[in-house]
Image (cartoon, helix red, strand yellow):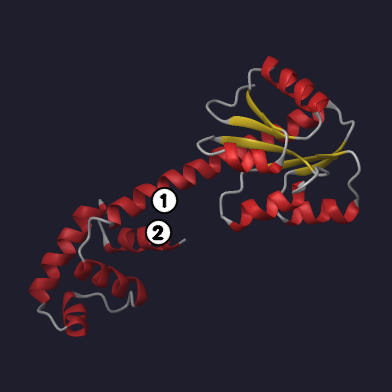
Amino acid sequence: MSAGDLVLVIVDDDLDIRTSLSRALRLRGFAVETFDSAAAFLTGCEGLAIGCLILDYGMPGMNGLELQRALLARGDAPPILFITGHGGVPESVQAIKGGAIDFLEKPFRQSVLLERIASALEIAQSQRQRSAEGRQVAERFSRLTAREMEIVARMVESPAEISSKDLGRYLGISPRTVDHHRARILEQLQVRSVAELIDLANRREG
């Protein structure tokens, strides 16, 4: 089992847990980073390609749920797997509602942990792929001028009125000028048809 270039991150204030868990995961070929508190993680996690955040619920200071909420608020929460020695049903429900993979009570079977990690890594890979595709789409749209973006927006907004004559009337320019813009838009966005253009624009919005 390999995580590729993704890192498993353990955040737990218990040194024994951090040591034993990180050793077991490294022996299975994973790259692992550990932090002893939520604050330490927030300070030191920049640049890490996190495949799964293995997060203790009951830490002093900022607890696991509070860290989860903080990550969700800033829009970069990785797949999270909670582990806890004293969490209850309300906490687990909150964690799962927040998108956590699972909420495991200590002691847990290593096989169960590995199954959940595998699920987290699949999600993380999908997230990375979507992010990469999103950046590529955004880069294509960044090549367009303001007028060309205006034409694209009109095409998406009113797909039944996208002839050069319709667009020219709406924008107050000649159909021939619209034709010129349309040709450049298709070229810059690397699409072959208006249908592909509209699909790409909708993916950008999504």
Q: Which is nearer the eye, 194 or 201? A: 201
Residue that numbered label 1 is attached to: 134
Q: Is residue 99 visible?
A: no
Q: Is residue 102 visible?
A: yes
Residue at x-position 41% and y-position 46%: 133
87 vs 165, left or right, is right
196 vs 77, left or right, is left
Image quarter in which the N terminus is found: top right
Q: Label 2 neighbourhood size at 10 Å, few (<14), some (14-19), many (20+)?
A: some
Q: Position of residue 134 (x, y in %)?
A: 41, 51
Q: Position of residue 71 (x, y in %)?
A: 62, 51
Q: Residue furthest top?
A: 27
Residue at x-position 9% and y-position 72%: 177
Q: Position of residue 109 (x, y in %)?
A: 86, 28
Residue type marked 1: Gly
Q: Position of residue 93 (x, y in %)?
A: 82, 55
Q: Do the residues bearing badges 1 and 2 touch, measured as CB atoms within 8 Å?
A: yes
Q: How far is the residue under mark 1 from the one under mark 2? A: 7 Å
Residue at x-position 87% and y-position 56%: 90
Residue that numbered label 2 is attached to: 204
Describe the element under mark 1 as helix, strand or loop.
helix
Describe the element under mark 2 as helix, strand or loop.
helix
